Amino acid sequence: MKKLKLICICMFCFFPFLCLKAQDVDFSLTREGNKVIYKVSNRMKQFVVLYETFVDIGTGSHLLVRYKNAEGEINAEILSVQDKHFIRVDPGESYVRSIDISRYVQNGIVAISAVANVSFDDERGKLKIVRMEKEIP
């Protein structure tokens, strides 16, 4: 029980630090007609690396479109947001990708969600990974 309390206290203390660190990387997802604009902006003093989903959906950046097919059933498809496995985003720069979703619009889009997984070195030189999620109905 003492270990559980210690773990909870540590999570409570360090989670705000990770959230504050993630605020230096802005992630936005907007829809403009039949396009989704996926944007990651780096406001940190060092570069960040954006990871592509290539092995596991839980470890990379991607776009998920939930849509109705011709029979009215809800399907989902994972779309790539990068053309390389790793994208370096330098300080003050942004990675922007426009993704065509026109093939999913005809029967109706239920929801669009996206994930941006970025990594960077913290002040002590340790690798930090931050997962950011957005959804647009």
Image (cartoon, grey):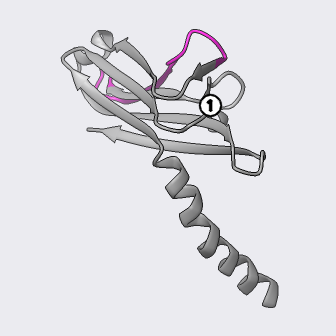
Location of the N terminus (image quadrant): bottom right
Residue at the spot x=70%, y=50% of the render?
123
Q: Is residue 82 left or right of residue 55?
A: left
Residue at the spot x=66%, y=43% of the render?
129
Q: Nearer the viewer, residue 132 or 63?
A: 132
- Residue 57 position within the rendered picture, expressed as x and y whole percent measured from the top left: 62, 32
Classify residue 102 by image quadrant: top left
Magenta-colored stretch includes residue 80 = yes
- Residue 53 position within the rendered picture, expressed as x and y whole percent measured from the top left: 63, 25
Label 1: which secondary element? loop
Look at label 1 and name its amino acid. Answer: Gly
Relative to 24, is 106 above or below?
above
Q: Is residue 98 left or right of residue 119?
A: left
Q: Is residue 25 left or right of residue 58?
A: left
Residue located farthest toward the bottom when viewing the structure as drawn = 2
- Magenta stretch: give its range: 68-86
Q: Is residue 30 left or right of residue 40?
A: left
Can see residue 70?
no
Relative to 92, is 137 above or below?
below
Residue at the spot x=57%, y=9% of the render?
83
Can see residue 20?
yes
How many numbered tags mark residues here?
Answer: 1
Q: Nearer the viewer, residue 104 or 36?
A: 36
- Residue 119 position within the rendered picture, expressed as x and y whole percent measured from the top left: 65, 37
Within-10-Å neighbours for mark 1: few <14, some 14–19, many 20+ = many
Residue of label 1: 60
Magenta-colored stretch includes residue 11 = no
- Residue 3 position within the rendered picture, expressed as x and y whole percent measured from the top left: 81, 83
Q: Nearer the viewer, residue 135 or 40?
A: 40
Relative to 108, is 124 above or below?
below
